Image (spheres, rainbow, N blue to C red):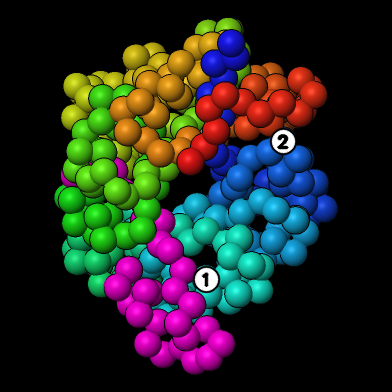
Amino acid sequence: MDDTVSAFGVIVNVDGYAPDALVAHVGRIEAFGFESVWITDLFGRDVYVTAGYLLANTRRIKIGSGIAPIYGRDATASAQAARTLDELYGGRFLHGLGLSHAAMAEARGHTWEDPIAKATAYVAEVREGRLLRPPLAGREVPVHLAAHGPKMLSGPARAADAVLTYMQTPRACAELRATVGPSVPVDLMMPCCLTTDEEIGRRMGRNALRIYLGLPAYQRLWRREGFTPADWADGGSDALIDTYMNWGDRDTITTHMRQCLDAGITNIIVSAAPSRRGDPESIWPLLEAVAPRRTAAGGETADIAPT
């Protein structure tokens, strides 16, 4: 019996591709049978505009904002963009929102506010869409809220339609599920690297964690797992990297995914790291290994499909 665990989606850094190459990349993910692609929003391409471009150039796959920072746009602008994409592309847009981090908000010229109050009010305003007019009025789009701290999970996340979370252990997944309750879908974004080479796996792990090592929100998360400041100093300890970068052979990677699903996660979204230095094409064996439909095996459907 094939016990492959299939992933729901893939997250893609859209700033790393020329337009035609981006369409080809997402098209290949679509052909593998994934249900969704989530695209980043930093200081490069606009996430909503890029989502529209990808939706126009794909047929079936859903495109999600992963995530659109709420300090980047007021709630009306976010609701307007999401509802427009929902209408024009038959409900294939997934509206991922999140606070991001204080440094990102301040870089945009905003003052960081109480995170719980800010997220609660923003999600409510997006849902209400009170300033929107037909044909957008009444087309509420489900909100996927980024969260991993207990206060965010027990407050705004419970009121959202789904939760997006990142880099969680199976133990933390179980705790997260207990906090949000049984009915809220929870999607886990998981860095993965298909390699049995310890040096490559840890190097890719350090690349993936690098921007998070100095962020208080992630340090709090790691403290809850028993790590100390020494673990996020100097590029991250091997123990920290091995915990949050899911590297190894196919069985190792899918076993970890299975543990998180069994702990209460609804879907896995893969952040694929190359298995060879300087070779972005080396992500495809990983994606083939966890795709709902593995093309190299004649298009078979995996035993465990995403919900």
Secondary-structure class at tag 2: loop
Judge whether 68 appears above or below 278 on screen: below
**In this image, 78 relative to 273: left or right?**
left
**In this image, 146 relative to 176: left or right?**
right
The answer to whether residue 302 is magenta is no
Predominant secondary structure in magenta? loop
Sequence-first disc among 2 and 1: 2
Q: Residue at x 27, y 55 (%)?
A: 157
Measure the C-alpha gap from mark 2 to mark 1. 26 Å
Segment tinted magenta in the rendering? 123-150
* Image quarter (top left, top right, bottom left or bottom right) of the N terminus: top right
Judge whether 55 appears above or below 21 on screen: below
Amino acid marked by disc 1: Ala
Task: Between residue 254 and residue 299, name the one nearer to us.
Answer: 299
Pointers 2 and 1 in contact (CB under 8 A)?
Answer: no
Q: Which residue is mark 2?
A: 32
Q: Residue at x 32, y 50 (%)?
A: 184
- Residue 45: x and y in percent read 63, 61
Judge whether 48 appears above or below 28 on screen: below
* Residue 292 seen in the current view: yes
Q: Residue at x 23, y 47 (%)?
A: 180
* Residue 287 seen in the current view: no
Secondary-structure class at tag 1: helix
Amino acid marked by disc 2: Phe
